[in-house]
Image: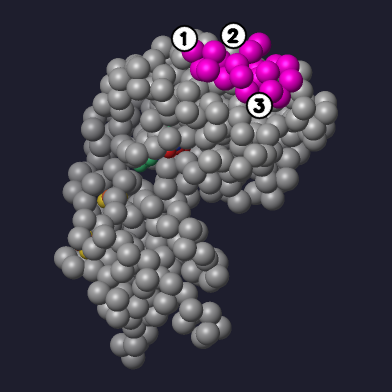
């Protein structure tokens, strides 16, 4: 059994104190939430911290609420608590469903949404879906607080834009409306997904036309990417949009930096996007999948 | 640090190091060797134990995390009389193991599911168990055993 190097765990009483603790211990310290990524990295000496600052003990950081049409998820909420939350199910069912398929039951019982986003693992499901749902994150530190779109949190593979001492405290997602259609699908044969595809549509007439669209792809590239040029192709009448799906596939694939890696070639990933864009579109508009 | 928790129904207090995984504490300090270690990366599930009824990977969870909580290992399932838990009996009845290395984790993961949802469908069982790997049985005997145990646990309620 791998034994970790010695460290000391600290229990801050607030996000502010956590931030101050990190400043105090400097490079020797890291924030610790579910530990599902952190402890693995420490086992392999990819990270070496002598001080872990346990964010899970900060009161209120794992709450889930709805306020003024927005779903607010505390950063230390576990995947499981989000998957099981009646509020999430009611106000953003695509989020609840995606969470129910992250990793396995054990990782979901301990891993947090905040940890998932901050680690910026390229094979993250939540980041891709949050890009199309319009999710934002609240970041706090001794220097103050700011709120940014999820896309601006992720700088690259395993790289977030958080500055030293900054804590992600809350993820905010607009609640689903009756005119919204959204879906997330992934393709997975290994431990982590090979492809993730999220789609959000706005329809004033129950799916006959789409006035606005957001689409994002993840896992096939170093970090999830919106397909901005594809989004234009995904508006119009339902029949028009269906006809333009192959063209939209190319626009999404071009927007993402498709990787040749152990999950497959870039060409194979383009093919996966093609297959899954059709599926995710049908799922979003509530049609049975073939 | 001093760690107090409930282990298989009995209070336990141990002196541990904060860097110790739950598996190190359970196997090394408590001699509960039914906690099996394989991938050490939360992938295979052989180290599954229950913390407050939820399945976790003892290989990666710090023992620090079970402060004041209830921990259940395979050693805590059978009754004092020796009567096996319905899941243990069902695994025997259906020959749901060969080498047996994955079995403690399989049974505990299944217990978490059935305690929460005793009418789980096959699809729900498969979705719940997909993070527990077996290299010997081909999974069908495991599914059959969980189905049988679900029926028995419902009848016993
Ligand atoms: C076997 C396995 C399979 C997986 N499969 C999937 C999958 O299918 N899909 C998917 O999306 N993910 C998957 N994951 C990733 C999983 O979702 C993440 O491991 C988990 O959510 C990370 O959260 P954590 O609380 O454990 O983070 P930790 O490991 O505690 O922390 C991760 C990093 O983020 C920092 N951090 C944590 N919280 C904060 C915060 N609030 N503010 C600032 N910094 C913070 C830490 O300092 C650390 O650097 C998988 C992981 C494993 C081990
Ligand atoms: S040994 Fe813990 S999950 Fe494989
Ligand atoms: S019985 Fe051998 S690994 Fe499952």
Badge 3 residue CB within 8 Å of ligand 1: no
Magenta segment includes A237 = yes
For mark 1, give the secondary structure. helix
For mark 2, give the secondary structure. helix
- Do residues under tags 1 and 2 come within 8 Å of each other at their CB atoms? yes
Across and down, in percent, residue A173 comes to 68, 30
Residue at image position (53%, 85%) is B155
Of label 2 and label 3, which has the lower sequence position? 3
Query: Would you name the residue on which mark 2 appears?
Result: A229
Give the CA separation, mark 1 to mark 2.
9 Å
Residue at image position (23%, 68%) is B97
Of label 3 and label 1, which has the lower sequence position? 3
Viewer-proximal residue among B20 and A139:
A139
Query: Which labelled disc corresponds to residue A200?
Result: 3
Of label 1 and label 2, which has the lower sequence position? 2
Residue at image position (61%, 37%) is A283
Q: Which residues are magenta?
A: A232-250
Q: In this rendering, do the residues under marks 1 and 2 share a single chain?
A: yes
């Amino acid at each position: 059994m791998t034994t970790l190097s010695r460290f000391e765990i600290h229990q801050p009483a607030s996000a502010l104190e956590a931030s101050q603790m990190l400043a105090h211990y400097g490079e020797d310290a890291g924030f610790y939430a579910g530990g599902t990524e952190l402890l693995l990295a420490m086992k392999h000496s990819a990270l070496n911290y002598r001080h872990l600052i346990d964010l899970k003990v900060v009161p209120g950081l794992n709450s889930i609420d709805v306020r003024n049409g927005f779903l607010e998820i505390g950063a230390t909420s576990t995947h499981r608590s989000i998957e099981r939350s009646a509020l999430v199910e009611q106000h953003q069912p695509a989020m609840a469903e995606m969470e129910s398929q992250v990793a396995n039951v054990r990782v979901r019982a301990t891993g947090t949404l905040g940890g998932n986003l901050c680690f910026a693992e390229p094979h993250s499901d939540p980041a891709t879906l949050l890009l199309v749902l319009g999710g934002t994150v609240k970041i706090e530190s001794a220097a103050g607080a700011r709120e940014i779109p999820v896309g601006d949190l992720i700088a690259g593979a395993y790289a977030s834009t958080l500055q030293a001492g900054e804590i992600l405290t809350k993820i905010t997602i607009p609640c689903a409306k009756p005119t919204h259609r959204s879906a997330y699908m992934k393709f997975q044969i290994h431990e982590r997904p090979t492809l993730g595809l999220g789609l959000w549509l706005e329809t004033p007439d129950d799916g006959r036309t789409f006035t606005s669209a957001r689409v994002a792809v993840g896992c096939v590239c170093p970090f999830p990417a919106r397909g901005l040029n594809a989004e234009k192709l995904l508006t119009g009448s339902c029949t028009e949009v269906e006809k333009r799906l192959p063209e939209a596939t190319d626009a999404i694939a071009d927007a993402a930096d498709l990787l040749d890696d152990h999950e497959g070639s870039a060409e194979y990933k383009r093919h996966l996007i093609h297959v899954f864009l059709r599926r995710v579109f049908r799922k979003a508009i509530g049609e049975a999948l073939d | 640090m001093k760690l107090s928790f409930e282990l298989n129904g009995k209070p336990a207090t141990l002196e541990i190091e904060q860097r110790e995984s739950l598996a190190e504490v359970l196997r090394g300090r408590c001699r509960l060797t039914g906690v099996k270690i394989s991938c050490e990366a939360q992938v295979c599930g052989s180290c599954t134990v229950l913390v407050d009824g939820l399945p976790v990977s003892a290989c990666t969870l710090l023992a620090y995390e079970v402060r004041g909580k209830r921990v259940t290992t395979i050693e805590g399932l059978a009754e004092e009389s020796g009567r096996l838990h319905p899941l243990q009996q069902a695994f025997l009845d259906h020959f749901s193991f060969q080498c047996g290395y994955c079995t403690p984790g399989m049974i505990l993961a299944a217990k978490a599911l059935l305690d929460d949802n005793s009418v789980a469908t096959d699809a729900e069982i498969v979705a719940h168990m997909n993070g527990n790997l077996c290299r010997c049985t081909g999974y069908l005997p495991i599914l059959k055993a969980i189905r049988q145990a679900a029926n028995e646990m419902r009848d016993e309620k």
